[in-house]
Image (tube, rainbow, N blue to C red):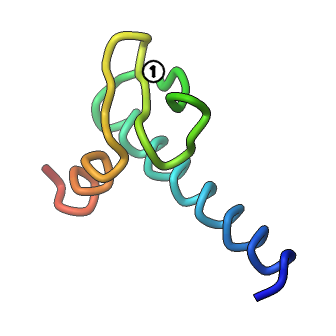
Amino acid sequence: MNKQDRIKIRLKYESICHTYIDIFVKKHGYEFSHWIADEIGDVACFIEQYFFNFNDIRYDIDNNI
């Protein structure tokens, strides 16, 4: 896999992560602050006081918890 393919995959992944965040925000009424250490898809911070692992966010949305 060449560098351009890796970049495309990474950009798609980041877009999907942000889509999950947008849905999570609408569902729970939180305001997204940032990704911890700028690691998209790891731990998300909401209103500077709630922290959720992306896998938990994804599970919440995928299973309508």
Q: Give whichever of 27, 34 is nearer the camera.
A: 34
Disc 1: CA contacts within 10 A as few (<14), some (14-19) or many (>=20): some
Would you place residue 5 above or below residue 54 in this image? below
Q: Based on the displayed image, in which of its 4 quarters is residue 53 positioned?
A: top left
Would you place residue 5 above or below residue 28 in this image? below
Q: Give whichever of 37, 45 is nearer the camera.
A: 37
Secondary structure at numbered mark 1? loop
Q: Residue furthest top?
A: 48
Q: Give percent across and percent down for residue 51.
A: 33, 25
Q: Which residue lies furthest to the left in this view?
A: 65
Q: Give percent across and percent down for residue 43.
A: 41, 36
Looking at the image, which residue is at 44% across and 44% down?
42
Q: Give percent across and percent down for residue 39.
A: 56, 41
Looking at the image, which residue is at 45% across and 42% down?
21
Left/right placement of residue 4 relative to residue 51 reads right
Left/right placement of residue 57 relative to residue 60 reads right
Q: Give whichever of 40, 30 is nearer the camera.
A: 40
Number of marks drawn? 1
Locate the N terminus and report the quarter of the image it occupies. bottom right
Looking at the image, which residue is at 65% across and 66% down?
12
Q: Give whichever of 37, 10 is nearer the camera.
A: 37
Looking at the image, which residue is at 67% across and 64% down?
10
Under mark 1, the amino acid is: Glu
Identify residue for label 1: 31
Left/right placement of residue 59 relative to residue 54 reads left
Q: Based on the displayed image, in which of its 4 quarters is residue 28 positioned?
A: top left
